[in-house]
Image: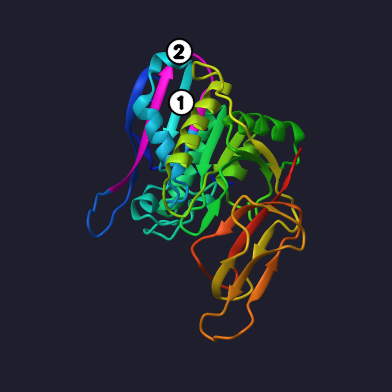
Amino acid sequence: MTTLQDSPVTATIPFDQDGIHTGHLKVPHSHDGAAYGAVMIPVAVIKNGEGPTVLLTGGNHGDEYQGPLAQIRLVSSIDAADVTGRIIVVPTMNQPAFAAGTRTSPIDNGNLNRMFPGRPDGTITEKIADYMARYMLPMADLVMDMHDGGKTLEFIPMACTHVLDDAEAEEKGWRFAKAFKAPFTCKLVEIDTIGMWDTYVEQSGTPFVTTELGGSGTTRPDWAAIGFRGVKNVLREAGVLVGDVEDAPTQFLHVPLEGAYITSESDGLIDWIVALGDPISKGQVLARVHDPVHLGSTPREYQATMDGVLAMRHFPGLVHLGDAIAMQATIVE
């Protein structure tokens, strides 16, 4: 039986002392520019007495900025006296990717959200995954990992939980998704769950909630406001932050297992017929993909496969064979 070695990752701050502590998770990284170098992942701990621990993570993909923005703002504005228990914040979990503005790490091409549970003796990205899985997760009573569409997708702003085999675990996540108070609250099925932080946390039995707040590789005032309010609402619902959940209207959605995602069957220039968030009807044309090289050719049409809303679209305008160009969601009354 193989025993995992201790992680080479170390924290520069304590996790068990009251107050606000900011520092880094230090991942050794020997390279041409620094023989004894390290990847420094920002981390903050806000602790006040006994109570639950909420682990906030963002930057799982480095080109997604809403989570890091909301969590950085939280650390800058929070008062430890308003906390009961502990909040651990890792706003740019895949720090190399975040620094480069890329989905995956420029060091090893690692997609952190497909590498859990990771390895202590693996690549930089695998070492990060291993530390988060074996050292950070066991401290948490709730995990919220914030996402958006990055540079290649744009979502309606929504808080999400996953459809799980364990109905009780699903309901725990749903409670916090609803508390976030995004314009949309969604139960979804992912295309690929192997190696995801989401999946690993859920399989551990720890309640998990996530978000998809816009995207297109940028930030916006409306998305930022939704994210910052939502983070505080989840902390309030968890009993860690003082105050009541700030109410806001939300529409409940469901992304089903079959037919929700539409994949491009060609390269081309996409011509959207409906806008993100618009109501859609089964059979309705959502978009056409034109061949920009062979002028006069007939564009390929993509139709809605269900009634509901257009919940995600490809970004930017050029698409390639195999790209996910749309995600549809049904409305839950």
Asked whether the viewer can see residue 190, the reply is yes
How packed is label 2: few (under 14 Cα within 10 Å), some, or many (20 or more)?
some
Q: Is residue 239 above or below residue 115?
A: above
Q: How many labels does the image show?
A: 2
Q: Is residue 330 left or right of residue 156?
A: right
Secondary structure under badge 2?
A: loop
Q: In which quarter of the image is the C terminus?
A: top right
Separation of marks 1 and 2 at Cα, in angstroms: 11 Å
Q: Are marks 1 and 2 in contact (CB under 8 Å)?
A: no
User: Which type of secondary structure does the marked residue at label 1 adopt?
Assistant: strand
The residue lying at 48 percent from left, 41 percent from top is 223
Is 170 in front, or is 27?
170
x, y percent for residue 119: 49, 49
Residue 175 x %, y %? 66, 29
Give the label on residue 87, or none: 1
Reply above or below: 211 against 277: above
Amino acid type, residue under disc 1 in the picture: Ile
Give the label on residue 202, or none. none
Name the residue: 33% across, 29% down: 22
The crowding category of the residue bearing disc 1, from other C-alpha atoms within 10 Å (few below 14, some 14 to 19, many at least 20), is: many
| Residue 135 in sight | no
Q: Label 2 belongs to which residue?
A: 49
Query: Magenta segment: does it hold 168?
Result: no
Check disc 2 and give the amino acid type: Gly
Magenta stretch: give its range: 38-55
Q: Which residue is drawn at 24% across and 60% down?
A: 32
In the image, is residue 53 part of the stretch drawn in magenta? yes
Residue 120 position within the rendered picture, expressed as x and y whole percent measured from the top left: 45, 47
